[in-house]
């Protein structure tokens, strides 16, 4: 009964305060499933405000699963350009192709079938199950986790590990409006229980929140080790143009255009080092300007003044901009 009261409070708040988002429109079941799939892929590692214009453009150009399964790869990457983490869009297309071929063009309702699709792990399968199919599952995204941690005052590493959070989320109970409830918990974290300066006075469940009682809203996280990597990046220039190659060597940015690079086994002693962060990898890069170009497979030249005309990852664009500003 207590769980139901909690759920009702959160849902009542959501009904009044939820944001208008393009994937939350009143849609047919088929469109709701497709919109949920696309939005959940885009929202991996990316904030809602950033995703909205990309989502609208994507749906306008690719309105359903069948269109996505047959969409031109180059145009697909161009639509995704700026969102980063390009493996997501490759997996999204692969998922569409599998669904069209093996699931009668319909997103599977079975959790394990969903999880078997490229790019769909535990969280995304849970989110799709709840939001698209109204299954009584509470997906634990960063926003919902934050609400849970503060509501129960979970601080220690053994309290905030994924296994314990999955157990503790039962405190939220369930609702027959499972789709809305999953989104309501996420929305509560996004709009009210913010990482800094939460709006407790507007929170529908603040009367039982232990963090509020203790006046301690600081969140602890399990520390991730940053992976330091060292690279030598070679710059070949012909007049004003730069040489790029297709990346077939590194796991990051696979098959995208990058500068010729090689990984080094030891830290760089030079002070002339450029640092880039990619996911949990610290990339320490020594830039070396070269005069002669040998035989480089799958290479091509780009004009730095026409960057917008190329399909390039953000990492490569950053290098170009760095070179142009440090001539």
Image (tube, grey):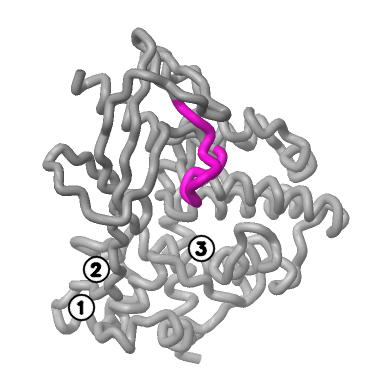
Earlier residue among tags 2 and 1: 2
The disc at residue 200 is: 2
Q: Is residue 310 above or below residue 117?
A: above
Residue at 21% x, 21% y: name it.
Answer: 325
Tell whether position 42 is magenta: no
Tell whether position 249 is magenta: yes
Residue at 28% x, 25% y: name it.
Answer: 289
Q: Residue 212 at x, y = what percent?
A: 20, 78
Q: CA distance from mark 2 to mark 3?
A: 19 Å
Q: Is residue 49 above or below residue 202?
A: above
Q: CA distance from mark 1 to mark 3?
A: 23 Å
Q: For this view, does 194 lie left or right of residue 37? A: left
Q: Residue 27 at x, y = what percent?
A: 69, 48
Q: Nearer the viewer, residue 298 or 95?
A: 298
Mark 2 in CB contact with mark 1 (< 8 angstroms)? yes
In which quarter of the view is residue 99 placed?
bottom right
Q: Secondary structure at mark 2?
A: helix
Earlier residue among tags 1 and 3: 3
- Point out the stretch of residues depicted in magenta: 244-255
Q: Secondary structure at mark 3?
A: helix
Q: Nearer the viewer, residue 219 or 132?
A: 219
Q: Is residue 33 above or below residue 66?
A: below
The disc at residue 183 is: 3
Mark 1 in CB contact with mark 3 (< 8 angstroms)? no
Residue at mark 1: 212
The label nearer to you, 2 versus 3, is 3
Residue at 19% x, 73% y: name it.
Answer: 217
């Amino acid at each position: 009964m207590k769980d139901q009261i909690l759920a009702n409070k959160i849902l009542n708040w959501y009904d009044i305060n939820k944001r208008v988002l393009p994937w939350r429109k009143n849609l047919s079941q088929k469109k709701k499933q497709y919109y949920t799939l696309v939005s959940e892929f885009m929202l991996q590692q990316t904030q809602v405000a950033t995703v909205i214009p990309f989502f609208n453009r994507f749906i306008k150009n690719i309105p359903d699963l069948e269109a996505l399964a047959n969409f031109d790869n180059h145009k697909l990457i161009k639509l995704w350009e700026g969102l980063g983490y390009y493996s997501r869009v490759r997996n999204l297309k692969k998922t569409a192709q599998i669904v069209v071929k093996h699931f009668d063009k319909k997103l599977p309702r079975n959790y394990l079938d969903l999880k078997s699709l490229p790019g769909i792990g535990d969280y995304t399968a849970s989110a799709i199950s709840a939001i698209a199919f109204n299954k009584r599952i509470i997906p634990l995204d960063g926003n919902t986790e934050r609400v849970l941690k503060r509501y129960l005052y979970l601080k220690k590493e053994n309290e905030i590990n994924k296994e314990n959070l999955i157990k503790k989320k039962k405190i939220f109970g369930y609702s027959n409006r499972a789709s809305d409830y999953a989104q309501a918990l996420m929305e509560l974290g996004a709009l009210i229980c913010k990482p800094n300066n939460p709006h407790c006075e507007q929170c529908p469940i603040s009367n039982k929140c232990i963090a509020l009682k203790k006046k301690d809203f600081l969140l602890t996280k399990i520390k991730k080790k940053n992976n330091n990597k060292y690279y030598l990046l070679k710059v070949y220039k012909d007049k004003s143009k730069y040489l790029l190659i297709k990346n077939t060597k590194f796991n990051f940015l696979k098959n995208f255009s990058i500068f010729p690079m090689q990984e080094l086994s030891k830290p760089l002693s030079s002070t002339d080092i450029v640092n880039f962060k990619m996911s949990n990898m610290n990339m320490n890069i020594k830039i070396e300007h070269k005069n002669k170009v040998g035989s480089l497979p799958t290479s091509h030249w780009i004009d730095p003044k026409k960057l917008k005309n190329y399909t390039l990852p953000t990492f490569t664009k950053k290098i170009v901009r760095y070179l142009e500003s440090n001539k």
